[in-house]
Each structure stands twice: as structure tokens, then as C-alpha cells.
Amino acid sequence: MIPKPSKTRENPLASLATDQVFLVNLSDNGLLADLPKLERSLLMKTCEPIELKAGQVLGAKDVTPMVYFLTGATVALLVMDEHRASLAVGLLGSAHAVGLEQVLGCHNPTLEHRVQTAGAAWCIPAPLLQALALDHAAILNAISRQLWLLVSHVASFAASIQTLDIQARLAAWLVLSAETAHSQHLSLTHEHLAHMLGVRRVSITLAAGQLREQGLLSYSRGQVHLLNLPGLAQAALPN
């Protein structure tokens, strides 16, 4: 159940009544594009544009919890252990939003949202989106649907970690990265990929070298070019 805002707090919807409203175009985010016209219009009046940087951890420095509707950036969902070792369990792009759990009043300190591909997004304070969701069932339904899809996404990742070797997992992550970023040219270092897969950097170097020998990709100085996406998808299948 979504916790209702305290009656003693200022109504976060009050700002929507002002005459001067900055309108933005949210159609590049699939979650928002599917909303009815009224609810999409309300969010267009309240979201603000932001440029996300590669390596940025979303929410780490937010005084007020924020929700980010991605349009150009991609964001990895990482599980962190007590030693800050990481493992990616999902990758979010323009069909997704980051921080929706804040709308439900939930927070998991072992989960981290780290920007993989720099790009654009729209952001909104979580308390404001919470208030909108309480007043508009279509927004609440969209949030619920998105969180359920995220659970399915994470479950698929968990299954692949158990069944694939490092080379296949690397191929799968590169295919997903290309599809999510809509580009076969990716700025990804071996160190970053090691953090995503939860393995040593040398393991990434060996696996990437094998994929390069097969003519599936090339890389230099942190720039990865995917030369054969169908071939990489085939390499990502279990042996």
C-alpha cells in the first residue's frame, strides 16, 4: 500500500495550479508515452530535464528522493554486498523509470542504480509523484506494471547467471546494452564490465578477446564496437 502524505505537510500538487508552468516532452519515455492524455499532461508540467553522466549513482546525493524517467541514458541495477562488490541484475533504458520504489516508501540499501550510458532523462520528486499516483489510478497502474516488469527482468538475469559461463554472460550484457542504448558503439571499459558481471577484470579481458577472435566485436581504449549483433546473441546462449 502506498503511504499517504501527512496532512500537516504542504500539498505537493499545489504547484500545479500556478500560471507559469514549464512544459516538457516526455514521449521518448515508453512508460509515460503509454499514459492517458490527462496524466501525461500533469507529468509534463512537473518533470524537469536532466543530463545523467556515466558512472553516476542515482539517488546517492538526493536530499529529496527522486524518480528518473529515462529517455537517452541507460542505468544498471546492481546488487552490492557488505564489501561493496557488485553484480548487475538488470539494465534500464527509455522504456523504464528509476526510483519508483521511493514512491511506495521503500528503499533497499543493497541495490544501486548506476548510469552506464550517459544521456537524458526527466526527473520528478518522489513525494510529488506519490501524490499524483494517489489521485490518478492510471499513474498508479503504470508504476505497478513497471515494477512487475522489473521483477521479471531481474529474475531472467538471476537465471542466466546460474546457467551461463563468463563469455556467454559478457555477450548477453553487450547485446542488452546495445538494444537498450539503441547503439552498437558503446563506451564500456573492461573494469566497468567486470563490475557489472561481478568477476575479475582479467576474466573480462579473456572473454572479450575470444569474442573479438570470432569477429563479433572490436574494442580499443574503452570503446566497444559490436560488429555482429546476431552472432553475439548466439554466443549468449547456453552451450
Image (cartoon, grey):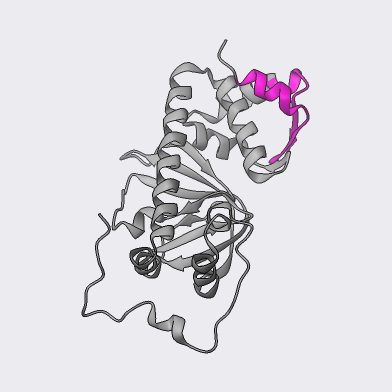
Q: Quadrant of residue 60?
A: bottom left
Q: Quadrant of residue 34?
A: bottom right
Q: Residue 196: horizontal and vertical position, in percent?
A: 51, 36
Question: Which residue is at 52% across, 50% downward?
Answer: 96
Looking at the picture, tell me which residue is in the foreground, 42 or 121.
Answer: 42
Question: Which residue is at 67% across, 38% downward?
Answer: 178
Q: Residue 81: horizontal and vertical position, in percent?
A: 34, 38
* Residue 99 against residue 215 in the figure, above or below: below
Q: Quadrant of the C terminus?
A: top right
**What's the magenta region?**
211-236
Looking at the picture, tell me which residue is in the foreground, 203 or 237.
Answer: 237
Looking at the picture, tell me which residue is in the foreground, 138 or 196.
Answer: 138
Judge left or right: residue 16 versus residue 5. Answer: right
Judge left or right: residue 190 versus residue 148. Answer: right
Judge left or right: residue 53 versus residue 5. Answer: right
Q: Residue 200: horizontal and vertical position, in percent?
A: 50, 28
* Residue 212 against residue 179 in the figure, above or below: above
Question: Which residue is at 45% across, 53% downward?
Answer: 142
Residue 216 lies within the magenta run: yes
Count the marks: how many? 0
Judge left or right: residue 212 versus residue 106. Answer: right
Q: Residue 73: horizontal and vertical position, in percent?
A: 60, 53
Residue 105 lies within the magenta run: no
Question: Which residue is at 35% across, 65% downward?
Answer: 130
Answer whether residue 59 is visible to the viewer in this image.
no
Answer whether residue 179 is visible to the viewer in this image.
yes
* Residue 50 against residue 76 in the figure, above or below: below
Q: Quadrant of the N terminus?
A: bottom left
Looking at the picture, tell me which residue is in the foreground, 41 or 184.
Answer: 41
